[in-house]
Amino acid sequence: METRNLFAEAQKIIPGGVNSPVRAFRAVGGTPRFIREAAGSKIIDTEGREYIDYVASWGPMILGHSHPDVVAAIREAAGRGTSYGAPTEIEIEMARRIVDAFPSVEMVRMVSSGTEAAMTAIRLARGFTGRDRIIKFAGCYHGHADSLLVKAGSGVATLGIPGSPGIPPQLAELTITLPFNDSDAVQNAVARYGDELACIIVEPIAGNMGVVPPRPGFLETLRAATHQSGSLLIFDEVITGFRLAYGGWQNLAGLIPDLTCLGKIIGGGLPVGALGGRREIMETLAPTGPVYQAGTLSGNPIALSAGIATLDILRGKPYPALDAMASRLCSGMADLFRKKGLPFQINRIGSMFTLFFTAEEVVDFTTASRSDTERFARFFQGMLEAGIYLAPAQFEAGFLSFAHTGEDIARTLAACEKALKTL
Ligand SMILES: *Cc1c(COP(=O)(O)O)cnc(C)c1O
């Protein structure tokens, strides 16, 4: 069926026609493409149009779509049953891989989404410290749990809503939101609320206001401030886990958070999340401790098979080559924008990048918000028309996969040159 008709049908029985808001193309206009299938770096819609994909299912598909080894692992696991609600050996295998890859992680609890991982992390931090307040950063997204959906970037920013009805103010009040990259604000808040503070949660590389790297010293300030106040430091590496290296940003930065949230890549495209950290904290979780958390499908054997297959392939993959491919794409786009004389910023770390339509350096949510979102929307439509599938909103990261080729980059740059003519 045609995309237009499918979208009309979907809107009759699914709110907004989508099961996750940013898929609805609200920020860019037009009709979202309904995807029929995907392989490697390409996705194909129901009308047979092919696109070079830089969304990568919002991060998980770092090996590209339908990697044959991952598909085989899923098939093989499905043949042995899809869920048992009892422990399995594969859960130990997954936990071992995460513990081996993350120096800060001694124990792991598997869940079914990044939202659950972050929600559990703050519950655990509150239960462990006996304190209620948390600090998060404007523009950082940690899933849609009540306490974390305050100035939460990504889809919330795209729709222009500060928070969400349905979250009691009494709960939202316990969330202190500070500007990303503002070490002074952190020190002031910790001085004021220190002994009430359960945790600071942060995306160590922000990806949900568009890509914004931490300034030198910012994450170190968080580490020192949490140590000093007896609160926990939570790194939400749902995007950055296995995206920039085999392991997380914490490995590259040489930092040891108390808790780490994972998701996306570790599920190989299936619904998976994980929470890990120091033994004494993790053992506060039920059944060893009093902080309750559970899940019917947690540690699901098919999802973990896809995740383990993905991690085992990633272990041998040349991340620097992936970074180089992303660098080629971004410097090519920068050249084209410069030639055209349009204001822009490209923030890139490894294979994640955002092209902001602003002249000013983007260091936090305020500077990201100054981007010209209308111009972004026109650019997005031009790229889509030319067969390039970018995230349909300014405040998102783009992702390359190991399946992207030099030819993909060349075609993307040619499309960019064409799209720029319409701006
Ligand atoms: C995607 C994301 C989440 C939420 O993960 P879901 O699987 O969508 O629930 C949490 N934190 C970060 C940093 C994310 O990018």
Image: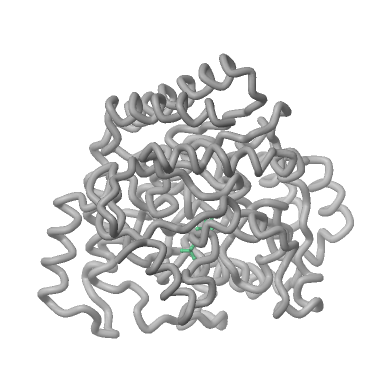
Residue 225 seen in this snapshot: yes
Its colouring scheme is: one colour
| Residue at x-position 47% and y-position 69% | 18
On the image, the x and y values in percent for residue 394 come to 60, 45
On the image, the x and y values in percent for residue 15 come to 53, 76
> In the image, 189: left or right of 287?
right
> In the image, 139: left or right of 260?
right
Q: In the rendered image of this protein, does residue 366 appear above or below residue 335?
A: below
> In the image, 51: left or right of 333?
left
| Residue at x-position 39% and y-position 54% | 57
> In the image, 376: left or right of 273?
right
Q: Nearer the viewer, residue 85 or 383?
A: 383
Q: In the rendered image of this protein, does residue 311 appear above or below residue 75?
A: above
Q: Nearer the viewer, residue 328 or 236?
A: 328
Q: Nearer the viewer, residue 17 or 192?
A: 17
On the image, the x and y values in percent for residue 352 come to 47, 38
- Please identify the quadrant where the N terminus is shown: bottom left
Q: Nearer the viewer, residue 150 or 256?
A: 150
- Residue 294 appears in which quarter of the rendering? bottom left
Q: In the rendered image of this protein, does residue 233 appear above or below residue 129?
A: above
- Please identify the quadrant where the C terminus is shown: top right
Q: In the rendered image of this protein, does residue 3 appear above or below residue 389?
A: below
On the image, the x and y values in percent for residue 342 come to 64, 23
| Residue at x-position 63% and y-position 71% | 128
| Residue at x-position 70% and y-position 80% | 166
